[in-house]
């Protein structure tokens, strides 16, 4: 690629003859006896001379030679010397691959130095994984999990940062050696079996590399599991920086889904960094499901009306605020035989779980007639909602919006709509039949302007509590003003 002619001069060990091989990159090559000058210069071994093209003369520059050797051949087991026009020859490669050495030979500072060199990082690794695989395939692995988040972790163009070597020769850092949810891992995988001239197309379809990917992925996840059990401080660093990325694996990696769920830590109504094992250990009597709520902010979720019935029974709820949470919770999931259930989707029944305070049971309070009230609200709202139902979620709020149990969640629909990847469906409006607002609707004159205003306000306040704007903010403001002035007028009268 860079030379117009290549001349190879070689003398076999123990032989007196020297041979030259010459090629200009055309249809063939020439082999001939070397000259006396060649024989004097090449006492043993091989000499390769590149006659560079005019546009490739930059490769004669010292810094270019050092850069190429450092990038591709720094770790091969033979020393490479640069012979300057003046001065003594000097070795320009390390000729030592740290990952090929045994753990017993290395100290913690050796790993730290290797991490900073391989990853180009300045922090300390939170996890180091070093081992050699022998058997059907032979390869060495040296991987690190950083302790800080890189700025480009969520860039669409970001690839994995694990470098592929073949017999200590660098091949590529773009071989996708780990799945996307482990893209924060840095390091080296050095194969003894892959060909040195492996192409990008071969990398994508090579069955040997696929086996290496699978085995190394499993080993990395297992190592993080051990870290969670034995070194909570370093695991916390990894989860704090990369938990949002690891949760992508719950959605993408069916084989390791249970392990990733066990590793995951959540903010809940009980505290921070709670595991699902801790959650299940604190189940309430007769509780059979793990409950969660997805939203865009922890504060907003904590004040969400859908929590009311769960809070009244002391049921812990996972509060999920990362964008990826809307995706992994969209697939049917269970942990240790306990299904994960959204508080914002489908029907709920907490009747078998006792209330914390039986005296606060509001079932004896006057309730609006269910059939009549729902019929009035449906007539007023029309096509704005899919359905109107009496709620089992609400205890103190008047209304909330939920999604059907068989479709996407409202949070997932919102994210997809923002990306122009889907349309939002009409929600289900759930109402609290014992709330004064709802009983006021049941008592108002059917078909009156007041009934329509109240029904629309019931929907719009549910939208606001869900983090959305009313469909027509100006009409909402006018409607609210009418009802307030009407109430003030009645009080004055």
Image (tube, grey):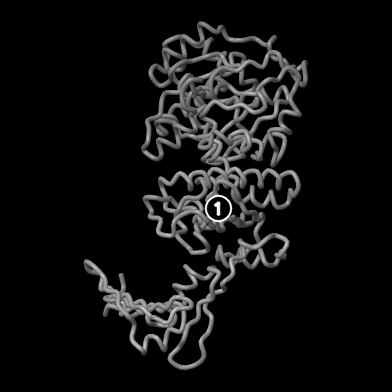
Q: Residue at x 72, y 15 (%)?
A: 361
Q: Judge from the rendering whether residue 265 lies leftward or rightward of residue 398; answer left or right.
A: right
Whether residue 59 is visible, yes or no, is no
Q: Position of residue 164 (x, y in %)?
A: 50, 57
Q: Position of residue 108 (x, y in %)?
A: 71, 64
Q: Residue at x 48, y 48 (%)?
A: 209
* Front-lying residue, 369 or 143: 143
Q: Judge from the rendering whether residue 94 lies leftward or rightward of residue 65; answer left or right.
A: right
Query: Number of numbered discs present?
Result: 1
Q: Position of residue 236 (x, y in %)?
A: 69, 49
* Front-lying residue, 233 or 189: 189
Q: Quadrant of residue 255 in the image? A: top right
For the N terminus, the quadrant is bottom left
Whether residue 127 is visible, yes or no, is yes
For the C terminus, the quadrant is top right
Q: Quadrant of residue 125 in the image? A: bottom right
* Residue lying at the far bottom of the rendered structure: 86
Secondary structure at numbered mark 1: loop
Check the image and report above or below for 432 versus 302. Answer: above
Q: Residue at x 49, y 59 (%)?
A: 166
Q: Quadrant of residue 478 in the image? A: top left
Check the image and report above or below for 204 versus 401. Answer: below
Check the image and report above or below for 377 versus 141. Answer: above
Circle 1 packing at 10 Å, graded few (<14), some (14-19), many (20+), is many
Q: Judge from the rendering whether residue 168 lies leftward or rightward of residue 17; answer left or right.
A: right
**Residue with the mark numbered 1:** 184
Check the image and report above or below for 232 versus 479. Answer: below
Q: Position of residue 405 (x, y in %)?
A: 51, 20
């Amino acid at each position: 690629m860079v030379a117009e002619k290549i001349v190879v001069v070689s003398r076999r060990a123990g032989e007196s003859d020297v041979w030259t091989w010459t090629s200009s990159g055309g249809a063939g090559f020439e082999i001939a006896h070397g000259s006396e000058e060649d024989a004097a210069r090449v006492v043993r071994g091989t000499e390769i001379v590149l006659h560079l093209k005019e546009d490739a003369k930059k490769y004669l520059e010292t810094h270019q030679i050092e850069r190429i050797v450092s990038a591709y051949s720094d770790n091969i087991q033979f020393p490479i010397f640069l012979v300057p026009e003046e001065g003594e020859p000097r070795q320009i490669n390390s000729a030592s691959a740290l990952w090929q050495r045994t753990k017993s030979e290395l100290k913690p500072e050796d790993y730290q130095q290797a991490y900073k060199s391989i990853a180009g990082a300045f922090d300390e690794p939170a996890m180091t994984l070093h081992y050699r695989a022998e058997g059907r395939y032979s390869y060495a692995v040296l991987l690190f999990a950083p302790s800080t988040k890189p700025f480009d972790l969520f860039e669409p163009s970001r690839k994995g940062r694990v470098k592929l070597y073949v017999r200590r020769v660098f091949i590529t850092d773009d071989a996708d050696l780990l799945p996307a949810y482990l893209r924060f891992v840095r390091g080296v995988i050095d194969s003894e079996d892959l060909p040195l001239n492996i192409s990008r197309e071969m990398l994508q379809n090579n069955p040997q590399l696929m086996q290496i990917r699978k085995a190394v992925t499993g080993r990395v996840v297992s190592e993080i599991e051990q870290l969670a059990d034995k070194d909570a401080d370093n695991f916390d660093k990894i989860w704090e920086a990369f938990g949002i990325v690891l949760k992508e694996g719950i959605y993408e990696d069916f084989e390791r889904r249970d392990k990733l769920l066990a590793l995951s830590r959540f903010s809940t109504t009980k505290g921070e960094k709670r595991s699902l094992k801790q959650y299940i250990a604190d189940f309430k009597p007769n509780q059979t499901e793990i409950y969660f709520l997805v939203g865009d902010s922890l504060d907003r979720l904590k004040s969400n009306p859908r929590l009311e019935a769960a809070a009244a029974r002391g049921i812990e709820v996972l509060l999920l605020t990362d964008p990826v949470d809307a995706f992994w919770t969209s697939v049917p999931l269970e942990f240790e035989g306990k299904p994960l259930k959204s508080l914002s989707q489908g029907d709920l029944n907490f009747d078998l779980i006792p209330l914390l305070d039986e005296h606060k049971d509001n079932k004896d309070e006057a309730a609006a007639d269910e059939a009549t009230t729902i019929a009035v609200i449906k007539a007023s709202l029309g096509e704005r909602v899919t359905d109107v139902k009496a709620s089992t979620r609400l205890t103190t709020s008047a209304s909330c919006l939920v999604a059907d149990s068989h479709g996407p969640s409202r949070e997932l629909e919102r994210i997809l709509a923002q990306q122009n990847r889907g349309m939002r469906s009409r929600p289900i409006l759930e109402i609290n039949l014992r709330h004064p607002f709802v009983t006021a609707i049941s008592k108002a004159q059917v078909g009156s302007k007041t009934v329509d205003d109240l029904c629309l306000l019931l929907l719009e306040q549910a939208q606001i509590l869900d983090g959305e704007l009313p469909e027509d903010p100006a009409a909402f403001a006018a409607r609210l003003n009418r009802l307030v002035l009407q109430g003030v007028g009645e009080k004055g009268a």
